[in-house]
């Protein structure tokens, strides 16, 4: 997909992963360290790069895999920028509609397609490139030591946007509705876990319980600064 200043590439068969997002020709997403194993047990083992959706969980449990199911399942393409995926271990369905214009507009609908209520968990997982000297507009460390990583959980509902600006001068603002996706964390990695260099802005739902057939919708926007 391409429009205006933006270019985006996704791989539906690879968990719907957005593998490239470029602004004025500059790649914004971390391209990883050459690991791409979608059948791996763990998310990092599978290759941590690009932009995934974390559904229906983040941490591994006895019943659910690391970083959820969505990153390892094939997604169905419904139209340009419009994809859908259904869980196998939990009866969830997530549709994602991406539109490029003045900004990157992403709309989501989560639906309980099962016969029992369950908690609707989603977390955005866009792994942006981390560079020393970049500016992150949130209450996070200004610099990370070489080989370090850190995850910062911000107070629930306290922010509805975080800006990122790279030394090149390119900058973006990631925004959302804090009443719909109030949980937010920022992941920063400067050469840890095998050499990844990435910063992720991760708004998420507060895991509301949905009855069978019930839906939850929200949005995410990435704007150029």
Image (tube, rainbow, N blue to C red):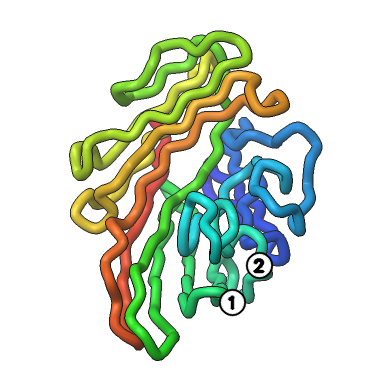
Q: Earlier in the sequence, mark 1 or mark 2?
A: 2
Q: Secondary structure at mark 1?
A: loop
Residue 201: name its quadrant.
Answer: top left
Q: Which residue is mark 1?
A: 88
Q: Is residue 79 visible?
A: yes
Residue 110: name its quadrant.
Answer: bottom left
Q: Is residue 172 above or below residue 51?
A: above
Q: Are marks 1 and 2 in contact (CB under 8 Å)?
A: yes
Which residue is nearer to you in this view: 82 or 152? 152
Q: Is residue 132 above or below residue 112?
A: above
Residue 209: name its quadrant.
Answer: bottom left
* Mark in front: 1 vs 2: 1
Disc number placed over residue 73 in the picture, else none: 2
Q: Is residue 24 visible?
A: no
How busy is the neighbourhood of tag 1: few (under 14 within 10 Å), some, or many (20 plus)? Answer: few
- Left or right placement of residue 85 versus residue 206 in this view: right
Residue plotted at (31% across, 61% down): 207
Q: Is residue 199 above or below residue 133?
A: below
Q: Secondary structure at mark 2?
A: loop
- Left or right placement of residue 132 versus residue 31 in this view: left
- Left or right placement of residue 112 versus residue 176 in this view: right
Residue plotted at (29% across, 38% down): 161
Q: Position of residue 168 (x, y in %)?
A: 55, 16
Total labels: the figure holds 2
Residue extending farthest to the bottom is 115
Q: Position of residue 9 (x, y in %)?
A: 66, 52
* Quadrant containing the N terminus in the rendered view: bottom right
């Amino acid at each position: 997909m391409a429009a205006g200043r933006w270019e985006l590439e996704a791989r539906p068969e690879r968990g719907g992963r957005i593998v490239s997002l470029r602004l004025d020709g500059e790649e914004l997403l971390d391209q990883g360290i050459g690991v791409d194993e979608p059948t791996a047990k763990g998310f990092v083992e599978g290759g941590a790069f690009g932009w995934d959706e974390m559904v229906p969980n983040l941490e591994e449990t006895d019943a659910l895999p690391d970083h959820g199911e969505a990153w390892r399942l094939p997604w169905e393409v419904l139209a340009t920028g419009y994809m859908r995926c259904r869980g196998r271990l939990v009866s969830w369905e997530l549709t994602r509609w991406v539109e490029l214009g003045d900004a990157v507009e992403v709309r989501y609908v989560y639906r309980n397609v099962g016969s029992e209520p369950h908690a609707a968990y989603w977390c955005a997982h866009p792994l942006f490139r981390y560079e020393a000297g970049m500016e992150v507009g949130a209450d996070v460390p200004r610099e990370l030591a070489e080989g370090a990583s850190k995850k910062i959980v911000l107070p629930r509902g306290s922010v509805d946007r975080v800006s990122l600006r790279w030394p090149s001068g390119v900058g973006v603002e990631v925004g959302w509705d804090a009443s719909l996706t109030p949980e937010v964390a920022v992941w920063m990695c400067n050469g840890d876990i095998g050499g990844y260099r990435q910063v992720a802005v991760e708004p998420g739902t507060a895991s509301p319980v949905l009855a069978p057939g019930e839906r939850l919708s929200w949005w995410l926007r990435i704007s150029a600064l």
